[in-house]
Amino acid sequence: MSAEPRINDRIRVPEVRLVGPSGEQVGIVPLAKALELAQEYDLDLVEVAATARPPVCKLMDYGKFKYESAMKAREARKNQAHTVIKEMKLRPKIDPHDYDTKKGHVVRFLKQGDKVKITIMFRGREQSRPELGYRLLQRLAEDVQDLGFVESSPKQDGRNMIMVLGPHKKKTEAMAEAREAQAARKAERQGVTAEAPEQSAEEPAEA
């Protein structure tokens, strides 16, 4: 069965409760009269409540209505927040430079509103020193505590130790801030571009 509403000649009832193009209540009228009004307004007669008795129909531009509905659905999907879990792998004896690099990635992920799964990989004799991995995870959690929190405490998983960090900021908030920052950068670039012709116009006078 189609999810599309019945329109115009596809409506098969003797009478309908008619709603005008501006939302005004016209009342219960014969179907033929409703179709006649639709032609006068150059609009479609659309059944908006098929289960009502009699069915409710509205006069509207159905093509425009479908287009606007599709655009709203598309915008809603665009703004929908999807939970993403990023992963960052570290070694228990990581050097300071690598640690700072990895921490930078974790900071970026949390700012974007994403969760981060931190995996400490043990090799060889390192497996007998799980406290090294635990201390490293604790250090990382403290270093990024302004942006995220420990959602899943460190736990051993075979040769690995895993911890999950959750962002303080919701994904939707992070997306909104990113859009605002992008708009601000665009406006700033346009402002610089607008000033450029004035400067070039002054140069010949100085020369």
Image (cartoon, grey):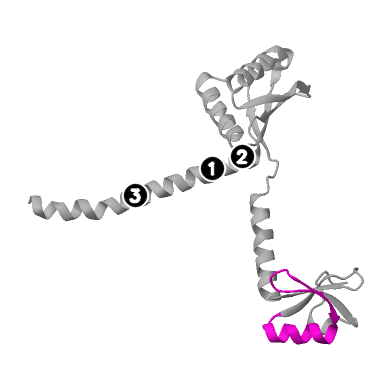
Relative vertical location of residue 119 with respect to residue 176 in this rendering, above or below: above
User: Judging from the image, what secondary structure is the residue with disc 2 in?
Assistant: helix
- Is residue 120 visible in this depiction of the protein? no
In this image, 125 relative to 145: left or right? right
Residue 78 is situated, as x and y percent measured from the top left of the image, at: 64, 53
Disc 1 marks a residue whose amino acid type is Ala
User: Residue placed at 31% from the left, 52% from the top?
Assistant: 193
Residue located beneath label 2 in the image: 173
Relative vertical location of residue 65 with respect to residue 207 in this rendering, above or below: below
**Picture disc at residue 18:** none
Local packing at callout 1 (Cα closer than 10 Å; few below 14, some 14-19, many 20+) is some
User: Residue placed at 77% from the left, 21% from the top?
Assistant: 156
Disc 3 marks a residue whose amino acid type is Gly
Using the image as rendered, state which of residue 136 and residue 196 is in the foreground.
196
**Picture disc at residue 191:** 3
User: Residue placed at 68% from the left, 82% from the top?
Assistant: 41
Q: Earlier in the sequence, mark 2 or mark 3?
A: 2
Q: Earlier in the sequence, mark 1 or mark 2?
A: 2
Residue located beneath label 1 in the image: 178
Q: Please say whether residue 191 is one of the residues in the magenta stretch.
A: no
Q: Which residues are magenta?
A: 18-43
